[in-house]
Amino acid sequence: MTQGKVYLVGAGPGDPQLFTLKGKKLLEQADVVVYDYLANPKLLSFCKEGVEKIYVGKKGGDHTLPQEEINRLLVEKAKEGKIVVRLKGGDPFLFGRGGEELEELFKEGIPFEVVPGVTSAIAVPAYAGIPVTHRNYTSTLAIITGHEAEGKPESKIDFKALARLGTLVFLMGVKNLPYIVENLIKEGKDPKTPVALIQWGTLPKQKVATGCLENIVEEAERVGIKPPAIIVVGEVVKLRSQFSWFEKKPLLGKRIAVTRTREQASKLTSLLEELGSEVVELPLIKVEPIYELSFLERLNLYDWLVLTSENGVRFFIKALLESGKDLRALKDIKIAVIGKATAEALEKWGIRPDLMPEKNYTQEGLLEAFSKVDLKGKKVLLARAKEARDVLPQGLEKFGALVDVIPLYQTVLPEETRDIFKQEIKHGIEVITFTSSSTVKNFFKLLSELNQPVDLKNVIFASIGPITSQELINHGIIPQIEAKEYTIKGLVEALLSYFKS
């Protein structure tokens, strides 16, 4: 059997966008991933299908596996010929016991590599607006574990030496905060020295308490700082009042559910995360193709092709290529789209639509645009979802068009969403975004399947437009937010406007 290999990979400080490119590449290749409590679970989405995921997290003294067993697990999986990624919070060699794991691998003759990670000791203060060094304040930095190995008869931390240094960063030290403060003051550190405690740094739920050595214990308790958090001691903490940037993000800490398909969620997720929100991806629809290629045999007979969604564009082009044709088959056909998102999807293929509503990106808006076009006797191919309103085909026929409606795809409720839905609804969601009537219908379908009532009175419902809003109203919910422009960008702008006001 071919021997495997172990990669010790730093998961970074929490924000998945701070994960390294090499780490991502290795997760994509791994057969086994052994991961910690502080490794963001979103990183596991990079893994290939069928990968074995083993959680070995340690949280507040509660160890899933003792370190010795973790070491043995890495050896065992590598000897099975597997590519193993040991995903460790922060950097593998900074109080992460990576050295101990490598010693065991070396002893057993297992090949290994180390992929450094962005350490929370520097990244977390940066997200709190604190540079750990600054030439006008200090050029010395010490990184100290605030929680030493169990069973030590006495501390190995030299507080006397630390008291003379500039910036001190203690990792995993919240429980020992009174002890740390007491010893620093005892060894000569000025009680007025600024201190910051940062919980869940780099993540939307980041929380910060500031004070000085003589009052930080009380201040941390008042703010409610709990692990995981780091402690920063030093004059550089004063710069936070000028440099704090992360907490100024307009949607910071807002827990927002995105209900689009998993394939389409990334654009909305990315925009919301950039604005500081904690995004819960809750795909309430899954798109499945249902087209038959035979309709393309008559393509040359049509004067107009009408596409009403990004998925419509995707599946039409897919069908066209599968049939052995290419974009040249559209050279004599005019194309109409329902709105900007559909137009952008089409333009990725080098095709610009001939017709699009100016503002109202709905079937009614597209009909208004068509009202200025002579459709008498014209043949129109309307390629769309199986379930859709009949406003558009009926309206086109009233204009004198001969309309063929071809269903390209259908939307279904993803089975895997059921478990995610139950879990996330229990954890609480502040805002739920809906981008189609189908997402609304499936949301209430899932609610009806739960065995317990869900309190929605404090949930903010955000709709991409009037048709989706009407579906919410049909279910007894008046959305607090509705996009003025019926696009993803318009929905985000509506969210910003709501929270700003």
Image: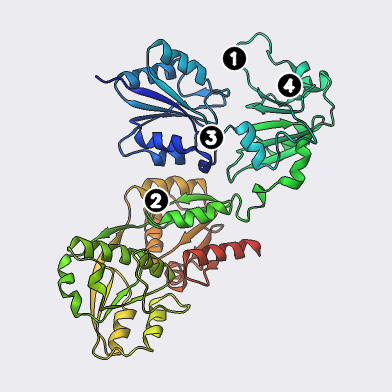
Mark 3 Cα within 10 Å, few/some/many (few <14, many 20+)?
Answer: many
Looking at the image, is mark 1 or mark 3 earlier in the sequence?
Answer: 3
Residue 319 or residue 395, whichever sits in front: 319
Q: Is residue 2 above or below residue 448?
A: above
Inter-mark Cα distance, 3 to 2: 37 Å
Question: Which disc is residue 12 wearing?
Answer: 3
Residue 138 placement: quadrant: top right
Q: Which residue is mark 2?
A: 450
Mark 2 Cα within 10 Å, few/some/many (few <14, many 20+)?
Answer: few
Q: Secondary structure at mark 4?
A: helix
Inter-mark Cα distance, 2 to 1: 44 Å
The picture places residue 102, in percent across and down from the top left corner, at 46, 17
Foreground mark, 3 or 2, reads 3
Question: Which disc is residue 150 wearing?
Answer: 1
The three-letter code of the residue at mark 4 reads Tyr
Mark 1 Cα within 10 Å, few/some/many (few <14, many 20+)?
Answer: few
Residue 344 placement: quadrant: bottom left
The scheme the figure's colours follow is rainbow
Name the image quarter holding the C terminus. bottom right
The three-letter code of the residue at mark 2 reads Leu
Mark 4 Cα within 10 Å, few/some/many (few <14, many 20+)?
Answer: few
